[in-house]
Amino acid sequence: MLEHSLQQAIKVYANADEASAYVADKIAQIIKAKQEKGNLAILGLATGSTPKGVYRELVRLHQSEGLSFQNVVTFNLDEYYPMHPVEEQSYVAFMKQNLFNHIDIPAHQIHIPDGTLELSAIQAYCDLYEKKIVDFGGLDMQLLGIGRSGHIGFNEPGSLQESLTRLVQLDTITREDAADDFGGADKVPTQAITMGIQTIVQAKQIFLLALSERKAAIIQKALKGEISTAVPATFLQQLEHVEYILDQKAAALL
Ligand code: PGA
């Protein structure tokens, strides 16, 4: 991507609430445009502290402005492995608490990687996850955060551009950042199931949201650094259908 168009892809907001409201509005527009045509909206969703404000605003749009999610199908990026959905650290619990329990999405339209599988069943499951996305016609939108390791989803440094949904090892930085949730970095699972880089980039629109000064250094590397497996988010630089939505603190080093 030319420097000029990359610059156009970056939107900097005064604070996290404004940045989150922008993304929520974009998602609501996709849902409504699909509703008008009688179609499903296929959304790729993310977990972590970053998207919470987006989900809060989507819940508000549902509760106060009548936005319906009846036509929405979701695919979450990732889940820890092993992980049971009833555990409070599970991304199933996160999504219920932050979004699904508060909207009218039919339960059977929700997809989150299954952290309870036998090791030997994982690859076939991941292949099926990919196939389901394709069978729905692909993701209309993928929401992303970014880890301080440079990961998108749980595609840690070393992930290949052509990677698909699979079992991965988590980076040390990622496990340190999750330490508070698990009561210590050593208690964080060492593995996860994640959509791949290729799964993500095939989405028709991508919104990468980064908030707070904690993300300033990795945002600088992801947007301005050399494209490399060392910082998987750099693979997005080549794409025209990515928007980077930042608060001023995350954009401080650009
Ligand atoms: P965070 O995680 O939103 O909790 O900072 C982002 C990510 O790891 O993608």
Image: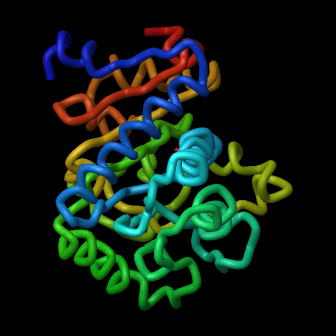
Image coordinates for residue 151, horizontal then vertical, percent? 45, 43
Image coordinates for residue 37, horizontal then vertical, percent? 17, 60
Task: Decide if residue 208 is in sight here.
Answer: yes
Of the pair 217 and 8, the residue shown nearer to us? 8
* Image quadrant in which you'd find residue 87: bottom right
Task: Decide if residue 189 is in sight here.
Answer: no
Residue 148 lies left or right of residue 75; in this view the side is right
Residue 254 lies, with reference to residue 22, above or below; the image says: above
Of the pair 197 and 136, the residue shown nearer to us? 136
> Residue placed at 57% from the left, 41% from the top?
57
Residue 239 lies, with reference to residue 38, above or below; the image says: above
Image coordinates for residue 222, horizontal then vertical, percent? 38, 27
Split into quadrants, the picture shows ligand 1 in the one at top right
Of the pair 18 and 48, the residue shown nearer to us? 18
> Residue placed at 66% from the left, 80% from the top?
84
> Residue placed at 27% from the left, 66% from the top?
40
> Residue placed at 42% from the left, 83% from the top?
122
Q: Quadrant of the C terminus?
A: top left
